[in-house]
Image (spheres, rainbow, N blue to C red):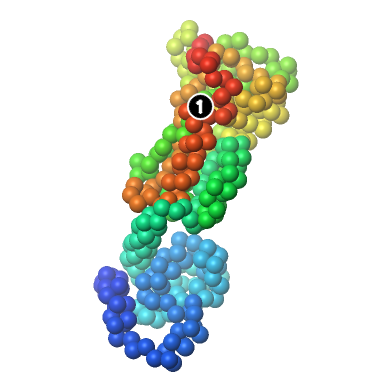
Amino acid sequence: MAIDALQQLCCTAIDIVAEEKRNRVPDQRGCADDAKRGKEHMDLPSQMILFARVVDAGSFSAAARVLDQTTSTVSRQIGNLEDRVGVRLLNRSNNGLVITEEGKAFLSRCVEISTRVSEAETFAESMNDRPKGRLKLVSTVAFGKSQLLPIIPAFLARYRDVSLSLELTDRKIDLSEGDADLAIRFSEQIDDDRVIAKKLARNRRLICAAPQYLARFGTPIRLADLADHNCLQLSTVDSWNDWHIEDLASGEAVQLGGNFEVNSADGIYHAALAGVGIARLSTYLINDDIRAGRLVQVFPDYADDSSNILVTYSQKRNLPPKIRALIDYMAEMFGKVPPWERSFAGKSDAKRTG
């Protein structure tokens, strides 16, 4: 079958299924067969959605895990789809699945149908004000461990019909591709104007080091002195390593560097505690450590407040109640003054100084 014929088939998929249903004459034998086949019976749009999920997952087994089906069922349905459209969509080999040229042409229509079905489900969900269903939340490792995990039990107790899947990662998240319903990110991580970002709290960062590091290498007196120290770096977000420090004498940016980098702010935090070097870290991570003496704020009059903590999502309309509930709950928990900053309430904001 030529590619243009495939495209025509995709465009009329819903009509084909509707026609099949109109022409089907139900009888006892047919009902019994349907019951026996169970999950084996799948209409064309469902097979198309399954094909898109298999391509996205990269294998039958990965798609089966996501969909809670057996690998053999997924493989058989894709085979049935190929028989139905009359072309091979995927080549199978020991190295995995490779989509064919016909499969690529077919895929775009399958993704379109999958998107429309998802939008219809979201709309139907939004008609019921009671939050329910599975909710996927992604957060940076450090914020998730220190701030989200402590407040999750109360959220789940309040909304008993919601189940929460939390992924802690500092990798880039594409909400438009369905990676998650919501993501906690920071201002410098947002580079997609399609997502909606709601501020949860200001992300104030301080410069700090462990007492043992300062005892060994000395305490910098001026911000420009940091150029002579081991400043811990993040390997995944270059802009994070710009501490917004200038030499007041020359007006030039101070070039920072060191011999250690890691792919997570959580890793930077633990490296600072271990005395590896000097770090610029968020107050939600270090305020307790500064109070306890595990870390020392190197420049008490310095703070970088150029970043915000954001909750991001991709849907603009018909936001499901479960998503609205979690957004509102986090806003309630963190409030105008987040819990990690409340001990500093009433103090004047820190200012950058050299």
The mark total stands at: 1
**Frontmost residue, 321 versus 353:** 321
Q: Amino acid at mark 1?
A: Val
Dot 1 corresponds to which residue?
337
Identify which residue is drawn at 73% across, 21% down. Answer: 212
In this rendering, the answer to whether 185 lies above or below 211 is below
Identify which residue is drawn at 53% across, 36% down. Answer: 333
Q: Residue 121: image x %, image y %?
A: 38, 61
Quarter of the image containing the N terminus? bottom left
User: Could you tell me which secondary element the residue under label 1 belongs to?
Assistant: loop
Q: Residue 250: image x %, image y %?
A: 46, 9
Q: Residue 18: image x %, image y %?
A: 29, 77
**Frontmost residue, 28 versus 36:** 28
Identify which residue is drawn at 45% across, 64% down. Answer: 53
In this rendering, the answer to whether 45 lies above or below 292 is below
Q: Residue 262: image x %, image y %?
A: 60, 36
Q: Is residue 79 in view from this perspective?
A: no
**Frontmost residue, 197 versus 153:** 153
